[in-house]
Amino acid sequence: MQEINTLWNIVLEKLKLSVADVSFVMWFKPLKVVDLNDDNVLYLATKSTFAKNQVLKNYFDRLKSAVEEVFGDNVEIEILDPSEEVAYISKNNPKTAIKDLEANKNPFNPKYTFDNFVVGKSNQTAYAAARAVAENPGKSFNPLFIYSGVGLGKTHLLHAIGNYIKETKPNLKIKYVTCEQFTNDYIESLGSAGKTKTYSEFRDKYRSCDVLMVDDIQFISKKTSTQEEFFNTFNDLHQFGKQIIISSDRPPKEIETLEERLRSRFTMGLIQDMQPPDFETRVAILRKKCQIEKYSISDEAISCIAEQIDSNVRALEGMLAKVCFLSGLLGKTTADLSDVSEAFNNKFEEKNQSGSTSDQIISAVCEYFSISREDMVGKKKSKEIVEPRMIAIYMISEMLDLPLVSIGKIFGGRDHTTIMHARDKISSEVKTNRKIQTFVSEIKKMLTSG
Ligand code: ADP
Ligand code: MG
C-alpha cells in the first residue's frame, strides 16, 4: 500500500503540471486511491457523483495517460462515486484502506501529545499558550514563538499542537517543518530544472496551509534569500489569519543572523520561554515516561535519576531507558538504585579521596555522641538522637558524592527531602553555631586519625 500511495503521488505531480491549477485542485487532488486489485484495476474514489462524471467526461484521458506512465500500460482505471466506494470497500475489503493514506501523512509523533506533556512551573505558560493556539488556530497568539534550551520540550509541544488540530479540525492543513527542511526545500525549488514550476510548487506548499510550524528557526541561514522567502511566506499566511508557530533555542533578539524585519515579525504575537523543570516536575516526567513505555522502576531510583539530571529532559529520559535496560539485562522485573548507580558508571562510589565511607562516618558520629547505630538510622525523634543524625547526614553529603536518595536509603529509607532539609539545616548552623562547628571538626579529626 505504501508503494501505491507513493506512485499515486507521482501521478498527482504529473497531473499538476499538465492542467490548470483550478482543474487540478477541483478534480484531481480530491481523488483517493481505494484499491489496486489483482487484475490491475486502479479504483479511485471521488467526493460526489457530479465529480465522478466531470472526471469521466473531461479529464479521463489525461488521468489515464498519467496513470499509465507511472503504473504501467496494463492498468485499468475505475472511478467510483461515494456510494460505489462504500459498496466496493464492504464487498472487497481492500488492503488499501484510505486510513493508511492519512496515517502515513501524519508527520506528528503520536506520543507527543498534550496529555503526555507534564506541566510544571517551568513550562506552564508555554503549555497554556500552545493549548490556546491549538484550540483556536489563528485567533489567539500569532505567531507563537516558543524558545528554550535543548531537550526541554519544544518539539513535543509543536507536535502536540499538530496532533490536537489533526484530531479536532481534520480539515485544516498543517505544515510542520524544521528550519533546515524549509531551507532545503527552498533551495531545491530554485536549483532544479524547470525552475518556475518547482518554485511555484514550493510556494503552494507553504502558502496553502492553515497552520505553519517551523521548528528550530535559529538555524535560518545567513542567506538573505531564504530569510526573504520566509518573510514573504510569513506575511502571506499572517495576513490571512493563518497560524504560525515557531520554536528556537533562544529568543529572537539573540538570533544573530536574523534580519531586523523578521525579528519584528516574531514579536507581533507571543514570545514564550521554557525553563528546565524543577525536581518535582522531573519526577513527574519520569513517572509519565514509565507509564508510556511500561517501565517498572522503584521510586528511589526515579528520585535518584531526577536528582542527578536537572537541565535536559531528553537526557533524563535517556538515563531512564538506560537504567531499565541494564536492569532488564540482569533479569530483574523492577529497576532499583543499584541499576541507577550502574548506569551512572558507579559514579556514586561511597568513598571520598581520604577513603572515608558513609559507614565510617556514621560510626564516628555514633561514637562521638555515644548513641547506637540502630538509633542513628532509626525513627526516634528525641533531641539527643536527632541532632547527631542530622550531623551525620550533613557530613556524608558534604564529604561524599552521593545522591540524596542514596543517603536517604542509608538512613532507613528516609525521603530525599528529609535528607535535604537536614543537610541544609546543619550547613547553615555550622556557619554560626560554635557548638556544632566543634562537633563537626572533632568528628572529622576522628575520621582522619584512624
Ligand atoms: P526540544 O525540542 O526542546 O529540544 P523535545 O521536545 O525534543 O525538546 O523534548 C525532548 C524529550 O523530552 C522528548 O522525548 C519529550 O517528550 C520530552 N519532554 C520534554 N519536556 C517534557 C514534559 N514537560 N513532559 C513530558 N515529556 C517532556
Ligand atoms: Mg526540538
Image (tube, rainbow, N blue to C red):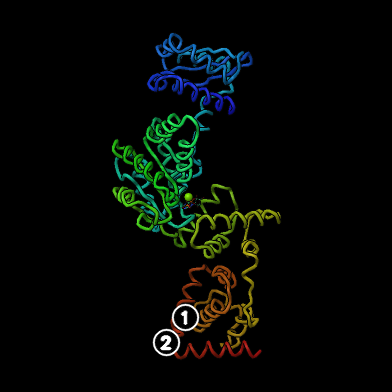
Q: Which residue is mark 2?
A: 432
Q: Is residue 420 placed above or below 17 in the rendered structure?
A: below
Q: Amino acid at mark 1?
A: Ser
Q: Amino acid at mark 2?
A: Thr
Give the farthest residue toward the top. 57
> What kind of element bears circle 2?
helix
- Whether residue 357 is visible: yes
Measuring 32% from the left and 37% from the top, which residue is drawn there?
236
Measuring 47% from the left and 39% from the top, which residue is drawn there?
185
Question: Between marks 2 and 1, how big is the CA–CA gap?
Answer: 10 Å
Q: Which residue is mark 1?
A: 427
Quadrant housing the C terminus: bottom right
Q: Is residue 255 placed above or below 90 in the rendered structure?
A: below
- The image shows residue 28 at horizontal and vertical percentages of 45, 20
- Which is more N-terminal, label 1 or label 2? 1
- The image shows residue 139 at horizontal and vertical percentages of 29, 40
Q: Quadrant of residue 49?
A: top left
Q: Quadrant of residue 131?
A: top left
Quadrant housing the N terminus: top right
- The image shows residue 85 at horizontal and vertical percentages of 49, 15
- The image shows residue 385 at horizontal and vertical percentages of 52, 81
